[in-house]
Amino acid sequence: MTSLTENAVELRGRLSGELIGASDPGYDQARAVFNAMIDRRPDLVARCTCVSDVQQALEWGRAAGAPVVVRGGGHSAPGFGTADGGIVIDLSPMQSVEVDPDRRTARVQGGATWGTVDTATHAHGLATPAGIISTTGVGGLTLGGGHGYLSRKYGLTIDNLVEAEVVLADGRVVTASESAHPDLFWALRGGGGNFGVVTSFTYRLHPVRNVICGPTAWPVSETKNVLSWYRDFLPAQDDDLYGFFAIMTVPPADAFPEAFHLHKACAVVWCYLGDPADADEALAPVRAMQPAFDGIGQAPYPALQSSFDPLYPPGLQSYWRGDFFGAIPDAAVDAHAHFAEQMPTMLSTMHLYPVDGAVNRVPSDATAWAYRDVTYSQVVLGADPDPANADAIKKWAIDYSDATHPHSAGGGYVNFMMDEGQERVQATYRDNYARLARVKAEYDPSNVFHVNQNIRPAT
């Protein structure tokens, strides 16, 4: 076994991309991830520009017996895009997007962000379901499952994945699909980064150009009333109507009336995919709730996707907790109303994302994503730029999550979890965990890819 930094000059010679060590200029920037709570020092960061670079960096890490870390967009809340010691396989230089408008597909390299994808597909009036923040990397979001504004109508991101090019733990490159390496393809769809380095994804696209979208908001004192209405209203609507419920502090932005700035509120952010001529009718019950603010209008889909980007830039202190819910009982509504009043900072928030509609019409064993029978994916996020507030936002997020968790389905969205241990990982995958462990044993028996929500190889 060799030291990871020993003969690093040799590895530099093998890479077409840049290799950055602790003594190199730009090291602190290269090692940084989105969550500023995470401060780790890898030995090397390999900024890969091609599949061969990924293979070389992977081989180097394995030979040294050091942690091998894979980073796409770097948004992982628990900081799985870095580690002390080891080598980071940084895919961020690999950002190409190739759209085939006739086949309605897009081939996307593993280091791209969703903003890049949305821009490329929007030029053809197409899109695929993918989160609500455009700076998020395609890799982490997809491998965790992926839900967003289009999910009630078009399913999860993984439901629209056609194939994936993967560098396996032993360095081989394979293409996984329904017809090639089908067990691997099954596991990639929700099983996280456990099975290899995905260097490209091919997605199915859908006709989406401009959408009717935007927030409606009420004073925080109305949380119980609005959430009780929302939990019953949205599941009964056509799949064309999507809206996620949020508690928030109104940012001091021009989009909101000045009198509302910095006030705590509850809100629903809407996206209507039907005929714009039908939008007023679809949203009439929303307006009957008399929101204090109505920001609904027509916008290009990428504008909606990027609307939260300025609020959540890199470098925030962030602590997340997530759970799935089949329903929101009155006791949970009461907990939401209580913790909404206790939000510790302007950027702290809670979102309830609908994952019904098309998501529910896929069998629970068709992909690694096991919770096809739930209605909502909840995330509680404590966030603030000031490290002095780290303890306060973490405590609020944990206390809030602990108060609502007893009403949950038991597991949570893997992309909304911190490093919470094996019991939590297994609860996330339900009965699919055993099969995932068998696939892990076939494709990564030594658990090379363990810096993640880890699925241990079956023995």
Image: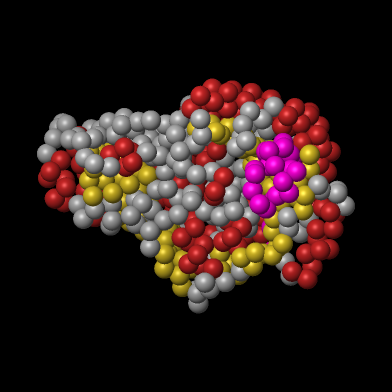
Q: Is residue 442 left or right of residue 65?
A: right
Residue 162 included in the magenta stretch of the image: no
Q: Is residue 16 visible?
A: yes
Q: Residue at x 52, y 41 (%)?
A: 415
Q: Is residue 446 above or below residue 207?
A: above
At 78% from the left edge and 64% from the top edge, which residue is drawn?
279
Choose between 241 and 120: the one closer to the eye: 120
Identified at 78% across, 71% down, the residue is: 277
Q: Is residue 255 magenta?
A: yes
Q: Is residue 373 visible?
A: no
Please, which residue is most extreme toward the bottom here?
Answer: 102
Asked whether 203 or 389 is in front, the reply is: 389
User: Residue 65 appears in which quarter of the rendering?
Assistant: top left
Q: Going by the image, does 410 lie left or right of 176?
A: right
Tell me the quarter of the picture where residue 297 sits.
Answer: bottom right
Screen quadrant of the C terminus:
top left
The quarter of the rendered structure image containing the N terminus is top left
Work out which residue is located at the far front of the displayed protein and give it: 258
* Residue at 57% across, 71% down: 125
x and y percentages locating residue 70 in the rendered image: 35, 43
Q: Position of residue 99 (x, y in %)?
A: 45, 70
Q: Position of residue 251 (x, y in %)?
A: 65, 43
How many numbered circles does the render carry? 0
Residue 205 in the image: above or below residue 269 = below
Residue furthest toward the right? 288
Rendered view: 372 above or below 2? below
Q: Going by the image, does 346 lie left or right of 290?
A: left
* Image spot of residue 79 (x, y percent): 42, 35
Q: Magenta segment range?
A: 248-273
Instruction: Name the colour scheme.
Output: secondary structure
